[in-house]
Amino acid sequence: MTRKTNFGAGPATLPAEVLQQLSAAMLSYGHTGLPLPELEHRGAPFAAILEECNALLRELCDIDNDYEVLWLHGGGRQQFCMVPQNFLTPHTTAAYIDSGYWAREAMQYAAYYGQSVTVASSADTAYDRLPEWPATLPLNTAYLHLTTNNTIYGTQWHTLPAATAPLVADMSSDILSRHHNYRQYALFYAAAQKNLGLPGVAVAVIHCDMLARANRNVPPLLSYAAQAREKSVVNTANVMGVYASLLMLRWTKERGIDAIEAENAQKAELLYNHLASSKLFQTRVAVAAHRSLMNVCFSATDTRHEKALLQLCEEHNMTGIKGHRSTGGFRVSLYNAVRLPDVQRLVTLMQQYEDSVQE
Ligand code: PMP
């Protein structure tokens, strides 16, 4: 069966060569004589996988050994739990920037562990832009949390003002998509299923000064300090998932962040330019400077066009462009493994549809 072009927001499309290497390893990993799912999580081959993952991530993010890199279970939401569990105390407050669904969800998880406040929000304009950066933070702020790319609303922080508290970033949907100053964060994390591999895995990268402040009374599986001590192997690790991340990191390095950033900008420009000239489809994001290069969200002027375009795409082997259930409309995800010709084909199809309707 022909492989569909997947513009889905996650699990996202993976490069064919990564899938080929992963399937070969599923049957037999390297010279071990074992299928990847049977690889011992405390053995030397997996230790080497982890070591290479850490080195590549550090290199691609341009960070040093003063950051711990951890490969953890539970995807993005487990980080929503671990961040407050490890850093919120009875005497501190967690400050959250509310830029949409995932940012809010992160804050709601934090409320289970202690006190959290919203310090900026664009809820009043239905998240059609980023909020104003908070002018002040509560005095006892443990950390300021933000979502660098808002997967559902299609907004993205392209630059960040300085923060007066340790910055914690959910980078699930734009990690490694561009050159970025990762050193501004005390902690950044990402669910792997967009630019970094398979669902269920998350990477968390923590500066050692932040790690030194972590709460001690946390069960080892959920403790950043214990995971750092045990080199991400507190329990039976997701060997397959972490290996998929390694393949994605190698693929990312081979292409290079320069080339990835340039192609991501081209893909997004193509689609936003098309939307700007379209009479049937319009972008959801009001402020051009806030538009995401990873998730382009738009709506149809008429639900008739919405249904027709969704169907047309499926007929042409393109899938995953339906907007999130909470927003409706469309969302085209342009993660690193989505290539420029894929977007060109989509835009051509949209144009053909628009021409056929207007004739
Ligand atoms: N944060 C962001 C920005 C996301 O886009 C997502 C998922 N799409 C999550 C967190 C949640 O990830 P998970 O489903 O792995 O819990």
Image (cartoon, rainbow, N blue to C red):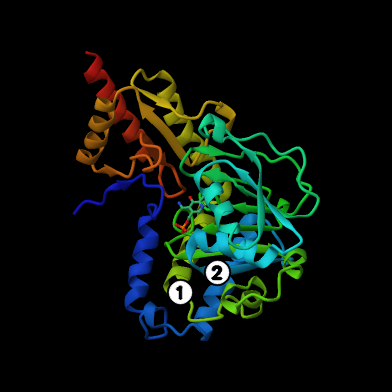
Image point (61%, 75%), residue name: 227
Tags 2 and 1 in contact by the CB under 8 Å rule?
yes
Q: Gap in Å between the C-alphas at discs 2 and 1?
A: 9 Å
Check the image and report above or below for 78 versus 40: above
The reply, left or right, for residue 105 in relation to residue 113 is: left
Image point (79%, 54%), residue name: 140
Instruction: Say what amino acid the circle numbered 1 marks.
Output: Asn
The reply, left or right, for residue 120 in relation to residue 100 is: right
Is tag 2's residue or tag 1's residue first in the polypeptide sequence?
Answer: 2
Where residue 54 appears, as percent x and y from the top left, is 60, 68
| Mark sitting on residue 238 | 1
In terms of depth relative to the viewer, which is nearer, 110 or 272? 110
Check the image and report above or below for 111 versus 277: below
Q: Is mark 1 within 8 Å of ligand 1?
A: no
The answer to which image quadrant residue 244 occupies is: bottom left
Check the image and report above or below for 72 versus 127: below
The reply, left or right, for residue 74 in relation to residue 137 is: left
| Mark sitting on residue 169 | none
Q: Badge 2: how crowded within 10 Å, few (<14), some, or many (20+)?
A: many
Residue pointed to by mark 2? 71
